[in-house]
Image (tube, rainbow, N blue to C red):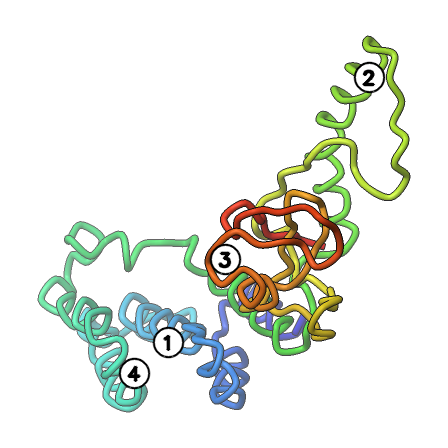
Amino acid sequence: MYTVLRELRENRNLEPAIEWARRNSNLLDSRGSNLLFELCRLKFIQLFVSGSTSLSGPRNPLDGPLLALQYAQTSFKDFQPRYATEISQLMGAFPFYQNIHESPYRALFDNDASWNDAASSFTKEFCSLLGLSPESPLFVAATAGCIALPLLAKAAEIMRINRTDWTTAEEMPVPIPLPPAYIFHSIFVCPVSKEQATDANPPMMMPCAHVICKESLDTYSKGSKFKCPYCPSESLPSQAVRVYL
């Protein structure tokens, strides 16, 4: 992964990343990933603007667009059904080849951030296929801590003023809202169905604070008021909230 990233960031060489994405295209497609097309589009733009990857550059202004057109004819065939709009935008840039940086397509062809975006997308997909987070665990923990600490400090100050104690040892005294990127897959086994929770069947907490999976909740409630399977409390399905563990 780091070898490919070094080529992308330091040498602006897309070939190792494209080769990896093609080898893993079936897995990437099953995830709905756009990585391979993003890389090939960036390669098209690189050829269109520079004409070649050499330092000498193109021999005349048409060298770049012609190389890009040849690349599109061989590499974009499989992308046509899914990315027809994006490909038509690239094709529409050809009449402006002499002043592409002043054309309506300048945002697409004059965007240095696209290289960082490609590197980020590659890192994310590479790690996802390995079941790993693209972020450093230390970075994730430190960032989540920075978000949570002000809320915890405020809660501690309120408890100090009110002379109350935080007596529950295994839960936070206040809800800690984290960004979606810091909310990971819940590992929870429903005590009713004995099945592990999934994204489609997440754990749900009832007003009485007991937690069961959504499918079990739907089975018990049948859309109306129901009794908790573990205590006498009654509630409505709409009162249950999703739990992230």
Q: Whole-Å distance between the Cαs marked 1 and 4?
A: 7 Å
Q: Earlier in the sequence, mark 1 or mark 3?
A: 1
Dots 1 and 4: beta carbons under 8 Å?
yes
Q: Amino acid at mark 1?
A: Phe
Q: Whole-Å distance between the Cαs marked 3 and 4?
A: 23 Å
Q: Secondary structure at mark 4?
A: helix
**Foreground tag (1 vs 3):** 1
Which residue is denoted by mark 2 in the rendering?
159
Which residue is denoted by mark 4 in the rendering?
79
**Foreground tag (2 vs 3):** 2
Q: Is residue 25 above or below residue 116?
A: below
Q: Amino acid at mark 2?
A: Met
Q: Along the line of sight, which residue is nearer the eye, 43 or 119?
A: 119
Which residue is denoted by mark 3 in the rendering?
116
Q: Quadrant of the N terminus?
A: bottom right
Q: Earlier in the sequence, mark 3 or mark 4?
A: 4
Q: Whole-Å distance between the Cαs marked 1 and 3?
A: 16 Å
Q: Quadrant of the C terminus?
A: bottom right
Q: Residues within 10 Å of mark 4 (few under 14, many from 20)?
A: some
Which residue is denoted by mark 1 in the rendering?
37
